[in-house]
Amino acid sequence: MFNYSFRWNQALNSLPDMLQGALVTMEIAILSMVIGIALAIALTLFRLSGNRFLGAIAVTWVEIARNTPALFQIYMVHFGLGGFGVHLSPYLSLLIGIAFNNAGYLAENFRGALKAIPETQTRAARSLGMTPLQAFRNVVMPQMLRISFLPMTNQMVWAILMTSLGAVVAMNTDLYGVTSELNARTFRTFELFAIAAVIFYVITKIITLSARLLAARLFRY
Amino acid sequence: MIEIENVHKSFGALKVLKGINLTVAKGEVLTVIGGSGSGKSTLLTCINGLEPIDSGRILVDGVEVHAKATDLNRLRQKIGIVFQQWNAFPHLTVLENVMLAQVKVLKRSKQQAEAEAVKQLNHVGLGDKLAVYPSRLSGGQQQRMAIARALAMSPDYMLFDEVTSALDPQLVGEVLDTLRMLASEGMTMICVTHEMKFAREVSDRVAFFHKGIMAEIAPPEELFGAPKDPELQKFLFATH
Amino acid sequence: MFDTALTTKDLIFLAQGAGMTLVVTAISVFFGTILGIIFGVFRYQVGPWWAAPLTFVLDVFRSIPLLIQLVLANAFITTVLGIRISGFAIACGVLSLYTAAYCAEIVRGGIEAVPQTLRRAARSLGMTWGQDMTSIVLPLATRVALPSWIGLALGVMKDSALVYIVQVVELLKSTQILITRLQEPLFLLMICGLFYFLISFPIARFGSYLEKRWSND
């Protein structure tokens, strides 16, 4: 039927290496989310502060992150900074690029979530004597994160998929990079990438399912 | 003592308070009645600095609320306020709701805060609901929690802004009972309310607001029994 | 003003890349939307159980990096099946299916957002299923779905940057080629980014505007 001899054995032998790569992929995705969430909270505070300069930074960041390709953003970090003489490792460029992207999308999610929280919550907190920052941190932010939980899960899935973009910065230790290198050596393109695809699918499903379980436990109110 | 001197306030083009002069002594229970838009709720939010005023002064124990130098956060520890919407913090249990501000603002230790919270929640009759989330409580229970939450800050003054207006009729009684209890314990209270019977029973004085001015202020027997202001007479006639 | 080695020929090269980006996007969004509507309506009509296989397949498209989808499709068609086909065709094919996968969800969500009561009223007046769909469901579902669809279309434009992997020279790849030659990364990337931004930003804003307007109705 096919004019092609599938050599699955050869490809499956590389499974350990690919799984190692998958670990690196997870590591980058998780780190980029942690950094991204922290940055997104900071950007949210910038917008809430009423300070025009900080607000402008926040808006600019969000709009650039959401209106340009993620690949472009990773390019900018790696080659753009390279133009300034700053040479980052592929790992760092990928991580920073994805974190930048995450921060932009998450900040926008947070902004939507905040709209669903009545202003009276802040008013009640301030009336009890809390400073604006205390009110945000203890009353508003927990609710904001709860409302944003599903979008954050989606962003996590995006982050995992985005690690494959490391291809343009010659990233070779994540799942895609490992698969790519194996491909360059053995030319079993279809088998190798099919296996990689399955691994990505499984990782994605594990994340979405875990998130659902986590939500059920965390948000019992 | 709360002193309100010639306070004016507008929301944009709408003048909401037109020269209010009022003094509330320690231990006094003052209820404020009047139609919607008469400015009564606005007055409360001005007293604790949530709203700015256009002119005049508000002094709480001699401290001017709207002076630039005033630390509003510290001032608000002295003035508890409970709103029409109880604004329970949904992500915290009842106990945590009442503990939060004590820990963050008053810097009490967790044990102190918890002890005080338990005391106040027992005080308002919610002692068995400590580990429950507000979403499981009725409106009346959430409102009582809000009262406990404000009381836990050990305030000198309590402001109540139509705290029963958003409640189902059968839940109003339990909240009014809590307010009655506080009044009998000597708390200085300013209550904006529509509940005339309550006003009659509990107040030392009643103030009637109409279109931004305080048209009449007198002890309840006088105000309800022999109202002088024509608008007040109309109001009392309409609400009986 | 700018001290650059960029020639007119280079600018034309970039413009061609930009053109390629737009063409790939347009074709993929067009076919992807048609397919997405078919899949979405099918899923809605047939219900979750019967549509499960389709749902699974579409879900796969959203759970695997687009880069891998392109590489796999390329490897499968050219190496396994032995069919000779241009990278452009593969790019458009994969992106169309990718678009369809997301579009089906958007369409299904849009249809579900139309209150059952309205549809029953239409059928009670004697309208057929087809008339119900076109006169009642279509306009209302579109209102709900359009802002998301706009977001999807813009997303496809951004994702089109990945088709370099099947030898399609779109804007970002063109930019990279110039960077390697001219060694002016920042300047060239700015131009490249500006292109994406100037197309995406106004359209995204318009989508938000529509969303706000229609949600207040």
Image (tube, coloured by chain):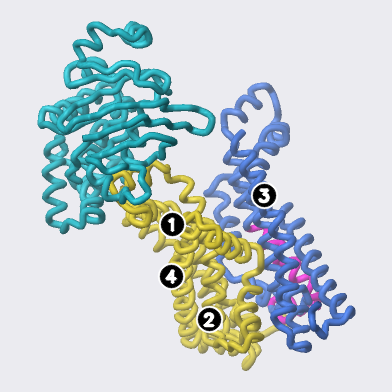
Inspect the image, locate mark 4, and give the three-letter code of the amino acid beneath it.
Answer: Val
Q: Which residue is mark 4?
A: A34
Query: Chain A colour?
Result: yellow
Query: Chain C colour?
Result: blue
- Percent across and percent down for residue C145 are 64, 46
Q: Which residue is mark 3?
A: C207
Instruction: Please name the residue shown 63% across and 85% down the image.
Output: A84
Range shown magenta: C76-101
Query: Which circle's residue, 2 or 4, is located before the other in the chain?
Result: 4
- Furthest residue to the bottom? A185
Give residue A175's mark. Answer: 2
Marks 1/2 in contact by CB < 8 Å: the verdict is no
The quadrant of the picture occupied by the N terminus of chain A is bottom right
Instruction: Please name the residue shown 56% across and 68% down the image.
Output: A101
Q: Are marks 2 and 4 on the same chain?
A: yes
Query: Chain B colour?
Result: cyan
